[in-house]
Amino acid sequence: MIRYDKSEVVPSSLRRGNAATTANCAAFEGDPGVYRSGERVFDITSKIYGTAVVKRHLKADQYGKCGFCEAVFDANVAGDVEHFRPKAAVLTDAGRIYPGYYWLGYSWPNLSYACPDCNSYRKRDRFPLAVEEARALDHHYDIVHEEPLLLDPYGAVDPREHIQFRGEVPIGKSPQGTATIEILALDRTTLARDRLL
């Protein structure tokens, strides 16, 4: 896993998400209980965040690689727009926390491009924190107080400070490095083979 620099040019299609985010925040204000229970969920549509323009920008920023495992995309693999902070719910060891980070569903800094293996099968809605009590539970909280255990491919921290390699095997040098390797299975055999090649 390496650190990427995100383009400062926000894809124009994400601007349509501003009104949707405002509406979602207002809906939460109207009845927080139904969203916290998971009875009602926010409509965060991929027609806004998952457009070809957004994917093209992210793919270019990441040199055609998955933001997590660095697998190279080719004609046979369609990538996913991945939400670093999950949009619908957060999966923890204790269960699901509702709602997710709905106010970041269309936020350019929260998006990356990931292979289906990392996004759909590994990370999914997982977003562990060093201190669970610091979790931002709705749009009134400030995410700056969170200490994610999962490394962000666009974050301020260079993943190489937290993950080292012994041959082709990644080793965690910190709790963040260890958690990232475990959650994303960065030590899976197929990745080790590709690194060797």
Image (tube, rainbow, N blue to C red):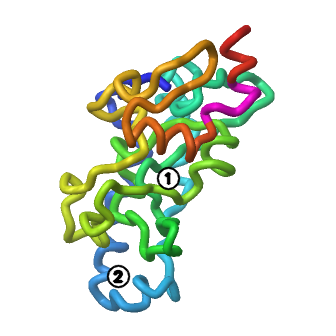
| In front of the other: 10 or 58 | 58
Which residue is painted at 56% across and 54% down in the image?
Answer: 47
Q: In the rendering, at what x and y percent does residue 83 appear?
A: 47, 50
Q: Which residue sits at x=34%, y=73%?
A: 23
Task: Count the marks.
Answer: 2
- Disc 1 designates what residue? 48
> In front: 137, or 43?
137
Between 156 and 28, the one nearer to me in the picture = 156
Residue depicted at x 40% and y 22%: 160
- Type of amino acid under label 1: Ile
Q: Residues within 10 Å of mark 2 (few under 14, many from 20)?
A: few
Badge 1 or badge 2: first in the primary sequence: 2
Q: CA distance from mark 1 to mark 2?
A: 19 Å
Residue 100 image-quadrant placement: bottom left
| Left or right: 38 in relation to 129 | right
Residue 188 painted magenta: yes
Label 1: few (<14), some (14–19) or many (≥20) C-alpha neighbours in 10 Å: some
Amino acid type at circle 2 is Ala
Disc 2 target residue: 27
Which residues make up the magenta segment?
A: 186-191
Residue lying furthest right: 76
